Amino acid sequence: MQREQQAPLGVLVNLCPTEPLSLQRIKRNEPDWRNLVRLSLRTPGITPSRLYFRLAIEAGLHFINFTPNAAETQALRELAEEKRLLYCGRDGKTGQTFLKTVLAPALRDRNLRIDGWYSTNLLGNDDGITLDNDDCRKTKQHSKLAALPQILGYQPGGSSHCHQVHIHYYPPRGDAKEAWDSIDFTGFLEMPMQLKLNWLGRDSILAAPAVLDLVRLVCYGASLKRKGLLHELSYFFKDPLSTPQSGMPLHSTPDQFKKLMDFLGRGQKRS
Amino acid sequence: MVTESPLVRTISPTLLSLENTILHGWDIKQDTMFGIAQSLSIAPTNSILETKSDLLALSPRIPPRENSQDIDTWILKRNGSHCGLAT
């Protein structure tokens, strides 16, 4: 397709369904990713998302992982960097986690202590069908739970029971996704307070522009001759990837946005 | 879109234009873009119907290897072609 269209740059966006958590663990050594002939979906440690990443590298395509699937194994990251390709991920941040990572830094900065954050989701599209599977849902929950402790610097309420994320497949809603958040927090003189949020979003309408943004920004990164992880795009992800060079992943949306704007400013300075 | 916001347009005027972007990919459960738009209700029904003929005209490309049964076969064939073997 790239050749036919004479497109100078190709980007592969991974939008695969959420994969089961149990399939994503690499028990011993990684598969021999360099040897394509020995790769098969039946080999342990090979998942559809990893295979897409590997094939993207083979085809010389930059890679965006919009799913929570752990596609970027260490060996595949190294291979992408060797080929001077870009990658970024994971898990598009479009709804509930977007709001969570906007609000949590604001509450933290006001020194309001979060004692508990209960999140639940209703969705009725194909994504909902996949997440109705316990093992797949664990992958998604793992991704959605990552942000809060990192932003706050502590586990709300000091226990995993005090930060819960639930996902329910509810067919009547289709693509109209609903999220509820109930937040317990404490202020001055130890006064307990609450905040209730109800997000009524549209899954595809929220995700599609983020995908287009990411494609454009990866092309921009390529124009700066970057390679490897494009960590400046963490703004778009629930579970942003990091490297020892990029430091701890940023989860706070305002901090991520600042990082993104700095990144975009680099191109202006260059021109 | 973030990249279409006035702030980003001020900071970075050099982003790839959407007109120069070619999209490719498919939800294999549907035969046309109209089917996808309808099944996902991604826009109000009247908007989808207004562009029905345009959406119906968008259908999947022929896959890279018509005879491939699964991704394993595709990889084996691709590797074969890399090594100069018959596929």
Image: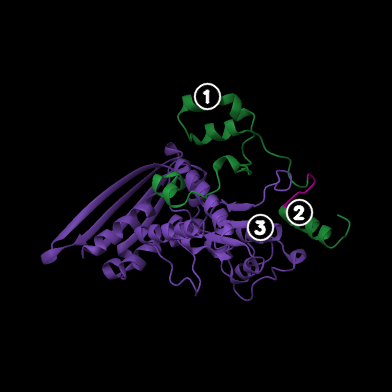
The answer to whether marks 1 and 2 mark residues whose Cβ atoms lie closer than 8 Å is no
Q: Residues within 10 Å of mark 2 (few under 14, many from 20)?
A: some
- Mark 2 or mark 3, whichever is nearer to me: 3
The shade of chain A is purple
- Residue B58's place in the image compared with A35, above or below, is above
Q: Magenta span covers which residues?
A: B66-70
Element assignment for label 1? helix
**Which amino acid type is marked by label 3?**
Ala
- Point out residue B49 in the picture as x, y percentages from the top left corner: 52, 24
Residue carrying label 1: B49
Q: Residues within 10 Å of mark 3 (few under 14, many from 20)?
A: many
Among the chains, which one is green? B
CA distance separating discs 1 and 2: 37 Å
- Residue A59's place in the image compared with A43, above or below, is above
Same chain for the residues at labels 1 and 2, yes or no?
A: yes
Q: Is residue A208 left or right of residue A176?
A: right
Write the residue at 72% across / 54% down. Answer: B71
Was residue B67 drawn as part of the magenta stretch in this picture?
yes
Q: Is residue A119 left or right of residue B43?
A: left
- Mark 1 or mark 2, whichever is nearer to me: 1
Same chain for the residues at labels 2 and 3, yes or no?
A: no
